Amino acid sequence: MSAEPLLSIANIAVDYPTKGFRKPPFRALENVTLDIHEGQTMGLVGESGSGKTTLGRAVLGLAPVTEGTISYRGRDITHLNRRERREISSEIQVVFQDPYTSLNPVMTVESILAEPLMVQGTPAAEARRRVAELLDQVGLPSDAGQRLPRDFSGGQRQRVAIARALALRPRLIVCDEPVSGLDLSTQSRVLELFIDIQQRTGVAYLFVTHDISVVRYISHEVAVMYRGGIVEQGEADAVTSSPTHPYTQQLMFAAPLADPAAQAERRAERRRLASLSRP
Ligand SMILES: Nc1ncnc2c1ncn2[C@@H]1O[C@H](COP(=O)(O)OP(=O)(O)OP(=O)(O)O)[C@@H](O)[C@H]1O
Ligand SMILES: [Mg+2]
């Protein structure tokens, strides 16, 4: 594991303003500290309302961070202006749960994927080449570019959203429940795609889910959120097989491990591949 984290979240708090006269703001995150390393997946679990989405939004500059700092490759990105945020958007991308609301319904897939490239000034011919490459990378047929988001299944639409996130070759993707809306067999194929992409590109994920089996499957490290704070974090194997915090124990007991030996072996193999592909 490299010494300097890709993303370093240090003691942040997020306070949402509340409506109403003299009502204090609502503290959604309190003293959250978390490092994400290059090429690795940080799984973020916790019950509904614990602050998982808020943390992802804080990283994207979309939540009001009132204390602490978020650094990307050593640079403080906690409070960027719009221009700086736009510049860093090529490095930090996002995939949401519902691709139907996050993809523009009247744009063809080709124009959805080309848009971020054009904004960065990529010439049209090169953008077309990159779009074809992206479709291939996420396992969509080459004629998918001419179709609209509604012409795809849920799993395929999520592949489009993943391709769009990859367009600018980010180093970090915030994935907020990206498989939660999919049926089980589609879920596992899309998870495989996330892993495959990570092995090929070295991208890191902040992977938000409330599903323990998903987080076991995809994460190198896991952080457990409870009421706006992180109660436990560490190696995925350790946190998911021998949790120390009572809340984590409760979460893990509710989701029995399918095949612990096979999963541990699989993660070891992923770590080996990740260390080979890292520059
Ligand atoms: N824009 C907002 N304004 C005010 N409060 C908010 C806002 N967004 C979230 N909250 C509150 O912050 C807390 C954390 O919400 P968040 O969406 O981060 O939880 P979550 O862990 O992602 O939950 P879920 O698993 O249901 O998606 C909740 O109490 C929520 O009501
Ligand atoms: Mg959420």
Image: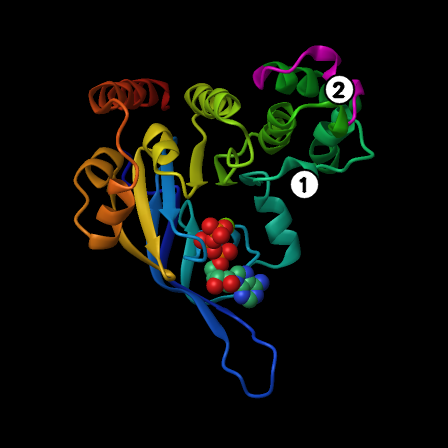
Query: Among all residues in the image, which is located at the extreme right?
Result: 106
In the depicted structure, whether residue 43 falls above or below residue 271: below
The circle drawn on residue 102 is: 1
Q: Nearer the viewer, residue 15 or 273?
A: 15
| Image location (x, y in percent) of residue 94 | 56, 40
- Tell me what residue is drawn at x 45 percent, y 30 percent: 203
Q: In the image, 214: left or right of 169?
A: left
In the depicted structure, whether residue 251 falls above or below residue 23: above
Query: From the image, which quarter does the C terminus lie in?
Result: top left
Numbered range of the magenta stretch: 137-148
Residue located beneath label 2 in the image: 145
In the depicted structure, whether residue 169 falls above or below residue 21: above
Inspect the magenta stretch and tell me whether residue 145 lies in it. yes
State the separation of the CA atoms marked 1 and 2.
17 Å
In the rendered structure, which amino acid carries the disc numbered 1?
A: Ser
Q: Nearer the viewer, residue 124 or 183?
A: 183
Q: Residues within 10 Å of mark 2 (few under 14, many from 20)?
A: many
The circle drawn on residue 238 is: none
Q: Is residue 118 visible?
A: yes
Q: In the image, 4: left or right of 177?
A: left
Q: In the image, 189: left or right of 217?
A: right
- Tell me what residue is drawn at x 41 percent, y 57 percent: 50
Inspect the magenta stretch and tell me whether residue 184 lies in it. no
Helix, strand, or loop for circle 2? helix
